[in-house]
Amino acid sequence: MAQITKKALAASLKKLLREKPLDKVTIIDIVEDCEVNRQTFYYHFQDIYDLIDWIFLTEALVTIDDKKTYATWQQGFLEIFQYVLANRSFVSNVYHSVSRDQLERYLYRVTYDLLIGVVEEQAAGMGVRDEDKKFIADFYKFAFAGLMLDWIRQGMKEDPVKIINRLGVLVQGDIARALDKYSMDYKKI
């Protein structure tokens, strides 16, 4: 029952964001649209920003769950783009509001989750320290999320497939090469 209510509140917020900017949406607007009372909202969420976090975490993380390998990372990243496009008004409103950092945190988290899986897979049997694997995943996380944030800022006009293909050319073999270098550094210590 709790998940149904949370999903209904999320749907109401998304619907309202198609009509007006985030800073004009109130909890009263959401609960009236959802036909619940304010207590129900506050039972599940602290505020609208908490609801936004929940939306990003529950809806979008699911999209990449099985795409955390070297062979599938491009599909996982494409699915993140597709999620953003499918939720264009929601994402644009969050991006252009004071809660932009929530969108950035979401993108950093989801891309890191995808990339650490790729790094771990590529590092199998190489003797690379966990901190070095994390560093590599963080490096690519900031690059990928930065590209996506720029794409959102520019109105989501460029075809995500073209972006992914260009990323693929850039990244192909680089993660393994970086891991190999860290593996050599580890052996020297």
Image (cartoon, grey):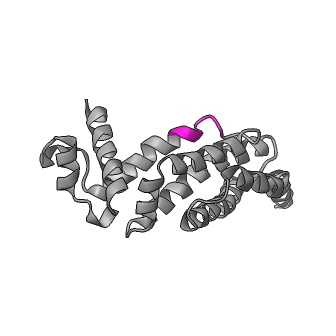
Q: Residue at x 53, y 46 (%)?
A: 83
Q: Is residue 141 above or below residue 39?
A: below
Say which residue appears at 13% left-offset and 45% top-offset.
Answer: 37
Comparing 159 with 103, the one in front is 159
Segment colored magenta: 62-67
- What is the quadrant of residue 5 in the picture? top left
Q: Is residue 53 magenta?
A: no
Looking at the rendered image, the quarter that the C terminus falls into is bottom right
Left or right: 34, with 121 as reference point? left
* Residue occupying image coordinates x 25% and y 29%: 1
Q: Residue furthest top?
A: 1
Residue 90 as seen in the image, left or right of residue 177: left
Residue 47 x %, y %: 25, 56
Q: Toward the viewer: 63 or 181?
A: 63
**Rendering coords of residue 64 (x, y %):** 59, 40
**13 or 3: which is nearer to us?**
13
Against 77, residue 189 (above or below) is below
Side of 94 where 132 appears, left or right: right
Query: Residue 71: where, in percent of width, then height?
Result: 76, 39
Towards the viewer: 85 or 68: 85
x then y, percent, for residue 127? 79, 48
How many numbered tags mark residues here? Answer: 0
Q: Residue at x 60, y 52 (%)?
A: 111
